[in-house]
Amino acid sequence: MSIEPSVRVEDKLFYNRYLVDAGRAHIKVRPHTTPSPELLSMLKACPARCYELNGNGQVEITVDGCIECGTCRVICEESGDIEWSYPRGGYGVLFKFG
Amino acid sequence: MIEEKFDAIVVGAGMAGNAAALTLAQRGLKVLQLERGEYSGSKNVQGAILYADMLEKLIPDFREDAPLERHLVEQRFWMMDDRSHTGLHYRSDDFNEEKPNRYTIIRAQFDKWFSQKVREAGATVLCETTVTELAQDAYGKVIGVRTDRADGEIHADVVVLAEGVNGLLGTRAGLRKRPTPDKVALAVKEMHFLPRETIEARFNLKGDEGMVIEAAGTISRGMTGMGFIYANKECISLGIGCLVADFQRTGETPYGLLDRFKRHPSVAPLIEGSEVKEYAAHLIPEGGFKAIPQLYGEGWVVVGDAAQLNNAIHREGSNLAMTSGRIAAEAIFQVKSRKDPMTAENLALYKKMLDESFVIKDLKKYKDMPALMHTQSQNFFLTYPELVSKAMQNFLRVDGTPKVEKEKTTFKSFIKARSWSGLFGDAFRLARAWR
């Protein structure tokens, strides 16, 4: 079995165009001390790897590379772990091909 | 506030929204279409295959100026294990016809063209505008929308929700539930650019001929999912998708899955030397007939992916979107022509017309398929592909073993992996769900 080369999502996101709405994150993670299983699953399930664990074991989000798929909304909105809105008109990912 | 009142507001400018807005405008209704992207297409993601028949019903002469990539002359189905694929290919010169049936397209370009047709038909298209919520009266009737523009409440007799698979408005207003992780797939896709001649040589194509590969098997690591490779003129769309619930359960990463698929020995030579220019992700409705929500109500209808209208077995979504958008618009036009109000009772006509179309008939046919594929994912996406690969290799490899023994080995491997009752059960369940 060969060793898996690690995939750098950052390199993939670099292909994309974005218009970042600075200071207005369209997804917010509810403050927590211990993350729920749903929130933890986003560390792997988010295709843009927007979710990361901080030094205190809490899940944080950086939305700049978000490709607006809605996976985290489907997994985490029900439990109240996140608040999900679309970016303001014109902002966010700008697909050239889609 | 925009003082003007519209006959209809269409939220979203994807396939369903554009079909609805075009049809409404063609019938002479005063239409406002709202799109959050900088243009129609800039937020839309699909494989993508376009089905000519459904577009012809909207724009009969679309072939004259639509940005089409390649017309499909070949379809390949691959059952994959880690080192092989067993293929079923269908190619016919009959598909080289005057009016081809299926094309590959690039959505950002196609939707921009589609949107131009909507404007030409007379609709007002307002881009870079995110609708934040539905405006409802004291009785809950939808009377318009609120947007992120200043004082952005706009009124209309009816709102067409074409907001896509991840539409927020309907859920926020309590009109339908948010899709659950077992009812939607997450697909990730890359656009691989290569010289035109290289693509044509690698896929055995001439001129504008095209081909698509749909692949299933161990590439999805036991999850319910599929990979795809579509040939465009100067690029290849390559992607893979699995149920969100499966990603959640297994801890597999979407980009990890995509990269394994790209490195598969059957796939790697096809994209070798390509330049990747985009990485996209999108949800796909997979719940089928049983996941369809309430389709209409007081002052509103829902169409396309937002209504979960997608045929997962035939990989058809955009045609169901276009058709539901067109039918919703025709129903609205009929209600309007009779000078009747846009009540739930009158808009029920949309559902009645949709029920009579191929959209609901097809989804009904496969109503048990999504659940079967989900509960049996290990068998259908891991066990069987491996067994088939072993059987094929055993059949083809010439090593002096008597054929009788070879057949016995293959036979035994199937029984060992699934048992008699398992094999018959799987065949029975599959046949029943397909019926």
Image: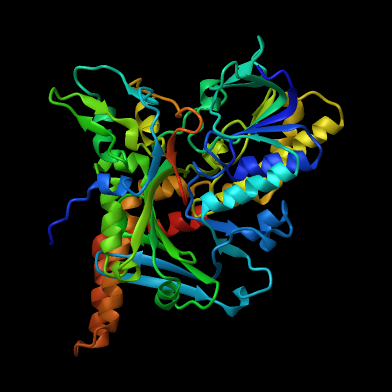
Q: Let me know if residue B343 appears in the view.
A: yes
Q: Is residue B77 left or right of residue B7?
A: left
Image coordinates for residue B386, horizontal then vertical, percent: 27, 65
Q: Quadrant of residue B4?
A: top right
Tell me which residue sits at (30%, 68%) in the image: B272
- Which residue is outermost to the right? B338
Position of the N terminus of chain B by quadrant: top right
Q: Nearer the viewer, residue B42 or B253?
A: B42
- For the residue pair B244 and A9, the one nearer the viewer reads as A9
- B139 versus B34 height, above or below: above
Q: How many callouts does the rendering have?
A: 0
Q: Nearer the viewer, residue B103 or B296?
A: B103
Left or right, B254 with reference to B195: left
Q: Residue at x 15, y 25 (%)?
A: A57
Quadrant of the drawing holding the C terminus of chain B = bottom right
Report the residue at 74% width, 58% height from top: B60
The relative height of residue B182 versus residue B369 in the rendered view (above or below) is above
Q: Residue A87 or B428: which is nearer the viewer?
A: A87
Location of residue B265 (image quadrant): bottom left
Q: Classify residue B122 as left or right of residue B87.
A: right
Up-down relation of residue A30 to residue B287 (above or below) = above
Residue B324: x percent and y percent? 65, 43
Residue at 13 percent of width and 61 percent of height: A2
Q: Position of residue A42 (x, y in %)?
A: 28, 34
